[in-house]
Structure formats: structure tokens, C-alpha cells
Amino acid sequence: MFIADTNPHRYIWIPVDLPAARNAIPQPDASREYAVQITVVRDGTIYLQRTRVLREDLANQLRDIAKMKVYLAVDKRAKNEDVEAVLDQIRLAGITSVVILANKSTR
């Protein structure tokens, strides 16, 4: 798992206010049509690609479309427990490569 620079939000399909990270690395594949992106918005709502999904359905839906890597975009105000639950569902789907999207910090 590593942090990816979104430079600014060019990879995000569902708008969220991403956290900042000093060591974010550009991830051009995150904006590709075939990239699998999960978004957690501020209120804990989860989107797979651009479609809203229930937390308990996420692992099964990921098994159908994701092979190896997912990109995770999380609003910086989302609750940690919501993010942890999504990460658990990703693991249940058998996916071991997760890229967390972030903005590159200027400080």
C-alpha cells in the first residue's frame, strides 16, 4: 500500500477532499479507464467506480471486476472506522495492492 499524488484531483471520479502527503507519488494509471477506484466520501458513503455500493456488498463486487490493484480515494474528514471497513472488504476480495490517493503536500 502506498500514497499516490493526485496532482490535483485528476484521478478522482467522485469528488472528495483528499488528505495531503509529503511523499505522494504520481500514479498515471489511476486515471485510466480500466482502473478500479473506490471512493469513501465524508459521510461514509462508498462508491465503486461511479456507483454507490453498500459496504457489505463491496467484496463480492470487487471479486467480479478487480484483479490485483485498486485505487482508494478517501475524503480527509471521513471516519477511520469507515475506511477500515472498506480496507477489510478489499482484503476479503483477495486484493493485496491498494493505492491511497492524496494531494502532494507543499510543506
Image: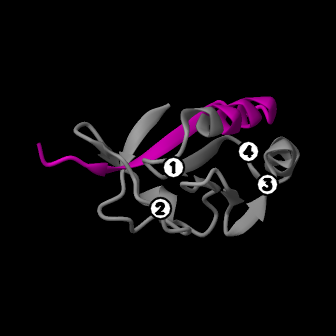
Question: Looking at the rendered structure, which numbered label has been put on residue 65?
Answer: 3
Q: How many marks?
A: 4
Q: State which mark lies toward you, 2 or 4.
A: 2
- Marks 4, 1: nearer the viewer: 1
Circle 4 SS class: loop
**Given the image, on which type of amino acid does mark 1 rest?**
Val
**Please, is residue 103 above or below residue 85 in the view?**
below
Look at the numbered discs 3 and 1 and tell me whether their residues touch, using CB distance below 8 Å: no
Mark 1, residue position: 74
7 sits left or right of 72 in the view: left
Position of 22 with respect to 65 (left or right) is left
- First-in-chain label (2 vs 3): 2
Real-space Cα separation, disc 2 to disc 1, in angstroms: 7 Å
Which residue lies at the image location 74% right of the left edge and 49% below the top edge? 66
First in residue order: circle 2 vs circle 1: 2
With 8 as the anchor, is 71 left or right in this view? Answer: right
